[in-house]
Amino acid sequence: MCGFVGVLLKEKALQFSTDHLEDIKESSNLINHRGPDEEGFFNDSSIALSFKRLSIIDHAGGQQPWLFGDDRYRMVFNGEIYNFKQLRSQLEEKGHAFYTTSDTEVIGAMFLEKGVEAFTELRGMFAIIIWDRQEKALYGARDAFGIKPFYYSESDSELIMASEKKSITYLTQRKKVHEVALQYYMSFQYVPDPMSLTEGVQRLEPGHYFVKKWNKPIRKQRYFHATFEPVKGNEQQIIRCVRDVMLDSVEKHMQSDAPLGAFLSGGIDSTFIVGLAKEVDPHIKTFSVGFEVDGYSEISVAEKSAEVMGVQNFTRNISAEDYVNALPKIMWHMDDPLADPASIPLYFVAQEAGKQVKVVLSGEGADELFGGYTIYREPTSLKFFEYMPNMLLRLLNKLAAIFPEGMKGKSFLERGTTPLQQRYIGNAKMFEEKEKAQLLQHYDKDAKYLNWTSNLYKNVQSCHKVHQMQYIDIHTWLPGDILLKADKMTMAHSLELRVPFLDKEVFEVARKLEVESNFTSGTTKAILRKAAEGIVPEHVINRRKLGFPVPIKSWLRNELYSWAENLINQSETNYVIDKQIARELLASHAIGKRDYSRKLWTILMFMQWHQIYVEQEYDVSPFNQVKQRARVTS
C-alpha cells in the first residue's frame, strides 16, 4: 500500500527545475499517512515520480518507483494484487525470470507480456502509473470497482497524477469551485466520477485505464464493466458457491506480514467476513464503534457476535463533541466533501484499529452485489402501479404533487407513478432540482442529476429493475461514497482496508444471481444469509440492516445547533450558496417542523470543505508550510 505523485512534462523543450522537483517531493509529503514506512523518488527529463509506502507484506525487493524492461519502464503502484502468485507461475512458464517476491515485479512482467490487457487479469485493488521512456507514453489504471483513488490534472505544460487531490492542488494552486460538480454534489451527497469539486482536477473512473503520449490528448478506455447476467441454478449449489468464493476471497485478502484485524458492526456483512477470517486466523482482532444515544449503536450486538465467535472485540463510543471536533481533519483527508454522516464513525473505528493493526477487513460492497439495501424491494412494493393505464398514473402523480410535504401517502404515490429512471439516482438523493435552483447562486439547468444517470440506465434497459438499481449504485454510489470514505478514513490512520466482497471472483458469482434469489421470505441478501449459516451467529443472520447510524437529527437540534449556525454564518460561500436558505432549514429543523438533517449536513459539509480548501481557515495539514505557501502564491 502506498501513495504516489507523478508529474509528466508535456513538451520535450520543458525541463524540471530544482525548485519544481522539491515542490513535487513536498506534495508527496502531504500524503505521508499513506506510506510512512518507505519512500522513493525518480525523475528523468520527462517525468518525476514520488512514492510513499506502507509496509504490509515484506517482499524481498520491489522498491518503487520500479524499474523494469531493461530500463525502459518506470512504475509506481498503490494497492495489493491478490493473485500475483498465480500470475507469476504463468509468467515463469512463458520464460519470465523473477528476482523478487513482490507483486510489483509481477505487474511489470504482465505489462511486458500483455500491455494494457494486463490490467484485466489483476485481482485486487490498485492505482498504477507506468512510464515508457522509449515511446514517451504514460499509462494509468484504476481497479475494477474504484477501491483505490486516482486523481489527475492536465495543463498546457504538464500532467499531474496523485493518490490524493491535495497533492495536485498544492502543486497547481487550484482552488476554484467546480460549480457543476457542486450542483451534482447537492443531490448525490458526493461528487460523482470523473469530476472533483475543484475545477481542473479529475478522477480516473473505476475499471478504466488511460494512455497519454506527447502532443496527443489522453485516451481513456474501459477494461472492466460490472454488469448483471442472471442464470437459473440449483439453490444449494449456489449457496455452496457463494460460501466457497467468499472463503477464498477472505483468505486471499488476509495475505499480510503486518498485524491484521477486522471491522465488526451488528450486520451480516462484516460478521460474515469475521467468521470466515477466524477460520484462517483464530486470533483476529475486531473493532466497533457506536454512540451513547438510543437506537444509534450496534456495539452491544457486535460484542455479542464477537463473544459467540470467540474473537477479541475493541469498542469506542463517540460523543457529539468528538464528532464535530474531528470534522476539519476528516474533511482535509477526504479531499472533496462527502455528506455521508457515516464517514465520521468510520474515521474513529479506523483510529482505534490503527493502534493495534496495520490491515483491516471490512464488508463494503456486499449490499451492491447481493441486493442488501431495503430500497431494492421498492420495485416489488410498487409493482401494482405497472398495471395502471398511463392516464391514471399521470392523474395520481399530479394529485401527489399537490399534497402537502410530509403527508402520509404522498411519497408512495410519487414513487409509484414516477418511472424508475426518473426517481432513482442511487442510495442518496438530497436536493431536488427545484430546490437547488433556489439554493445555488449559479444553477445550470443543463446539469440535472437525471442527465448523469440517464446514460447509465441506457446500458441496462432490458434488465430487471432491481438489477438496474444495483447497476446504478455500483457505478455511482459505491465509488463515490462507500469506497471513498473507506479509503480516506482508514488511510488517515495509515491503515490498509481490504474489502473481500469487492473481489472480481466474488462478483462473477453475484452477477449471475437471479433477483428472486436475493429477495425471498421478506428479506434482502437471502442467498448471502443462507451461505453465512453456521458461520454467522443466529442473532445476526436475519437482523435488519442498520449500517452506521449517526444521531445528527437530534444533534442538529441540540448539541450541534450552535456549531451549525456559526459555520453557516462564518463560511465565505455566499457567492455559490444562498445562505439564508441554509439558515431557514436549520431553524425549521431545530423547532421540529421537519427533519432537514441530511440536507443540512450536505450544505454544512460543503461549507466545512470550503473553509479548509478555499478559505484555508484551518491548518489541519501536518505540514504548516503548505498553508503558508498557498497563501503566499495564491
Image (spheres, grey):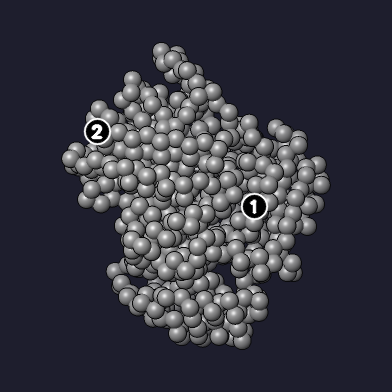
Q: Which residue is mark 1?
A: 351
Front one among 590 and 316: 316
* Residue 107 shown left or right of residue 252 in the figure: left
Give the mark nearer the N terminus: 1 vs 2. 2
Q: Residue at x 66, y 69 (%)?
A: 321
For disc 1, the neighbor class at 10 Å (few under 14, some 14 to 19, many from 20) is some
Check the picture and name the quadrant holding the C terminus. Answer: bottom left
Which three-letter amino acid code belongs to the residue tagged 2?
Answer: Lys
- Helix, strand or loop under label 2: loop
Asked if residue 246 is positioned above or below residue 72 in the image, the reply reads: below
Q: How far from the left and from the top, in percent, is residue 453?
A: 38, 60
Give the image quarter of residue 439.
Answer: bottom left
Which three-letter amino acid code belongs to the residue tagged 1?
Answer: Gln
* Residue 364 shown left or right of residue 198 in the figure: right
Q: How far from the left and from the top, in percent, is residue 220?
A: 30, 43
Q: Residue at x 44, y 81 (%)?
A: 579
- Helix, strand or loop under label 1: helix
Front one among 581 and 570: 570
Q: How far from the left and from the top, in percent, is residue 198?
A: 36, 61
Q: Residue at x 74, y 67 (%)?
A: 292
Asked if residue 15 is positioned above or below residue 71 in the image, the reply reads: below
* Residue 131 shown left or right of residue 480 in the figure: left
Asked if residue 98 is positioned above or below residue 337 in the image, the reply reads: above
For disc 2, the neighbor class at 10 Å (few under 14, some 14 to 19, many from 20) is some
Give the image quarter of residue 566.
Answer: bottom right
Q: CA distance from mark 1 to mark 2?
A: 42 Å
Q: Which residue is mark 2?
A: 136
Circles 1 and 2: CB atoms closer than 8 Å: no
* Residue 355 shown left or right of residue 404 in the figure: right
Asked if residue 22 is positioned above or below residue 380 in the image, the reply reads: above
Q: Residue at x 40, y 23 (%)?
A: 109
Q: How far from the left and from the top, in percent, is residue 315?
A: 74, 54
